[in-house]
């Protein structure tokens, strides 16, 4: 059984208009040992001006590595979400994210099937996803990078649907990044889903869902950007931890919440259980 550690997805500073390095340093100050940065392709105003936390893959990957080392934290993974069923959108982006991860020191790249093209069939989408994932696996395998498939969109909203995507390509580089909040909002029971994939987990998005959010959207959506503080919502974290202790590898719970205050409460709650 592997060790469980607590990390923080850097989306927690999104409403605070803070840049990447500030977000890394604040995560360390709050007591987090791991961070999960988000990478994008090209240049855009908000992060270049210091109002957003994502990092361009046009930057040197050592920007991420050096910021983490300076703050005394490690990188649990990179968020590189995009539509796997649209190779022209996500193919080169995902491969570049994997290469970026290898240089910056992130062991996992997380992604999902994203929003499908409006004109393709379900069968066509899975052929296209297989193409994108196989090309990505060819890049990930020799670099020792893992691809974490997340439950987030139309096909991965059920355990069978996520497994169908996972089984498209036979590669040791492909694993599961289960998002507890997305699973719950999609109308699923996250605990048996965790039991089902625990041997394949490479990362976990620790997302809690408030009672109000649950009442408004459960069963109507396939996921959400961020949740509430871990411990403030409907997810039983002691039960999640108990299941995840069966994981054969070390695992990071990457907290996905919406504010600095929520990040502070999340680590206190999770550390009290661990």
Image (cartoon, rainbow, N blue to C red):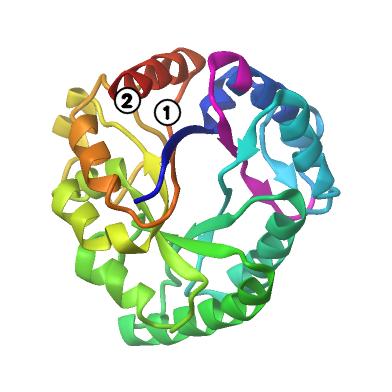
Residue 1, horizontal then vertical, whole percent: 34, 51
Q: Residue furthest right?
A: 60
Q: Secondary structure at mark 2?
A: loop
Q: Magenta residues, as a range?
A: 28-42
Residue 146, horizontal then vertical, whole percent: 54, 64
Q: Which residue is at a point 81% across and 36% down the rendered structure image?
A: 66
Label 2 neighbour load within 10 Å: few <14, some 14-19, many 20+: many
Residue nearest the viewer, comparing 64 with 257: 64
Query: Going by the image, does 126 lie left or right of 198?
Result: right
Q: Which residue is at a point 61% across and 64% down the rendered structure image?
A: 145
Label 1 neighbour load within 10 Å: few <14, some 14-19, many 20+: many
Q: Which residue is mark 2?
A: 230
In this rendering, is residue 116 above or below 18?
A: below
In this rendering, is residue 83 above or below 243?
A: below
| Image quadrant assignment for residue 238 | top left
Residue 257, labelled with which disc?
1
Are the residues tagged 2 and 1 within 8 Å (C-beta)? yes
């Amino acid at each position: 059984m592997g060790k469980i550690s607590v990390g923080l997805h850097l989306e927690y500073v999104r409403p605070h208009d803070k840049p990447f390095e500030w977000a890394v340093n604040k995560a360390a100050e709050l007591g987090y040992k791991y961070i999960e940065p988000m990478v994008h392709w090209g240049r855009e105003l908000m992060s270049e001006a210091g109002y957003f936390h994502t990092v361009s893959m046009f930057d040197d990957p050592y920007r991420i590595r050096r910021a983490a080392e300076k703050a005394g934290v490690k990188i649990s993974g990179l968020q590189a979400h995009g539509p796997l069923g649209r190779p022209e959108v996500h193919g080169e982006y995902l491969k570049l994210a994997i290469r970026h991860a290898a240089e910056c020191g992130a062991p996992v790249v997380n992604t999902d099937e994203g929003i499908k093209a409006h004109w393709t069939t379900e069968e066509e989408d899975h052929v296209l996803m297989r193409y994108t994932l196989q090309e990505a696996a060819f890049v990930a395998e020799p670099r020792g990078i893992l691809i974490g498939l997340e439950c987030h969109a139309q096909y991965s909203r059920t355990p069978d649907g996520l497994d169908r995507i996972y089984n498209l390509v036979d590669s040791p580089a492909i694993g599961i990044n289960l998002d507890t909040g997305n699973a719950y909002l999609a109308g699923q029971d996250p605990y048996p889903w965790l039991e089902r994939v625990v041997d394949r987990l490479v990362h976990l998005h620790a997302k809690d869902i408030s009672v109000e959010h649950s009442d408004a959207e459960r069963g109507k959506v396939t996921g959400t950007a961020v949740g509430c503080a871990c411990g403030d919502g409907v997810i039983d974290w002691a039960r999640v931890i108990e299941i995840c202790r069966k994981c054969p590898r070390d695992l990071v719970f990457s907290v996905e919440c919406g504010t600095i205050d929520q990040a502070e409460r999340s680590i206190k709650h999770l550390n009290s259980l661990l």
